[in-house]
Each structure stands twice: as C-alpha cells, then as structure tokens.
Amino acid sequence: MIDPDERPYGCFHCGKTLYGKSNQKYCNDDCRNKGNREKRNKEAWHEPRLVGQVITILKRNYRILARQQACEYRAVAVSKFKLVEANFSFKHFTSQLKTKTGVYNFVFDYGWRELEDGKIMVVFNPELTSI
C-alpha cells in the first residue's frame, strides 16, 4: 500500500525522500539555501571581460570630458594632446550627433568634435541626460 504522505521524488538539492506537505521542495533550510544559491549561479549571466573593460574606458572618458568642462555648460576648446595625455580613448563613445558643423561623439551627455587646428571642442548636451 502507498503511503499518502510519501512523495515519489526527493529534496531538490540532496535527493533525500520528502515527507509532509505536498508543496515541499527541500528537506531543510540548509538544503533550501544551497539549492537556491546553485539555481541563482546557474541563471546568472557572467559578462565577458571585454564588457567590463569597455565600461571602464567609457567611465574614464566621461570623467576626462567632465573635467574639461569644469561646470561650464558651454563649448570649450582643448588641445588633443591634453586628452591623449589623460589617456582618453577617441574610439570609445556611446552615441554620435551629426550637425552642419560636423560629427560629435558623445560619452553619455559630454561630447567632442575634432577641429582643424588640432584642437578638440568639448560640449555638454543636457538633453542626453534624461533617457
């Protein structure tokens, strides 16, 4: 005869036979914690190292551009050498804006455009802050 309290399956973590409630999944709190931890780790997306490196570069670019603006929300011309010396990466940006005067590359709300005389125009666009 089959016992109504006996379940055909066991604890989701250790496999021990379960008795008691019909919705029980784990035999004790320890198994429940370990099982949930394993489940989270399997479901977690581990970002590739490249993603972290690009985010670090974008943050550095943002800080460098923000320093050039120095709380002045107007266009500022700085030498390209000054940005290169601060380890600015011109190939990493988040968006572009094409205007009649040229193409602006933006790192979030700070942007730059190369001028003919070897200078870089740094601008701030507050409209990009409200996404």
Image (cartoon, rainbow, N blue to C red):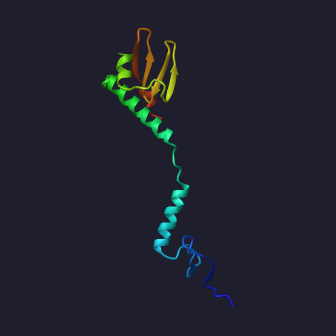
Q: For the image shown, how many numbered marks are present on the structure?
A: 0
Name the residue: 44% across, 26% down.
Answer: 89
Residue farthest to the right?
1
Residue 55 rendering spot, x and y as whole percentages: 45, 37
- Of the 4 image quadrants, the one containing the N terminus is bottom right
Residue that appears at 58% across and 80% down: 17
As rendered, which of 107 and 101 lies closer to the eye?
A: 107
| Quarter of image, res 130 | top left
Question: Can the viewer see residue 33?
Answer: yes
Residue shown at 50%/27% (left/top)?
95
Q: Position of residue 48 (x, y in %)?
A: 52, 43
Q: Position of residue 118 (x, y in %)?
A: 41, 11
Q: Is residue 76 in sight in this rendering?
A: no
**Relative height, residue 71 to residue 28 (above, below):** above
Q: Residue furthest left?
A: 70
**Nearer to me, 120 or 123:** 120
Instruction: Please state the horizontal and vertical placement of residue 68, each as a whole percent of the image.
Output: 33, 23
Residue most toward the bottom? 1
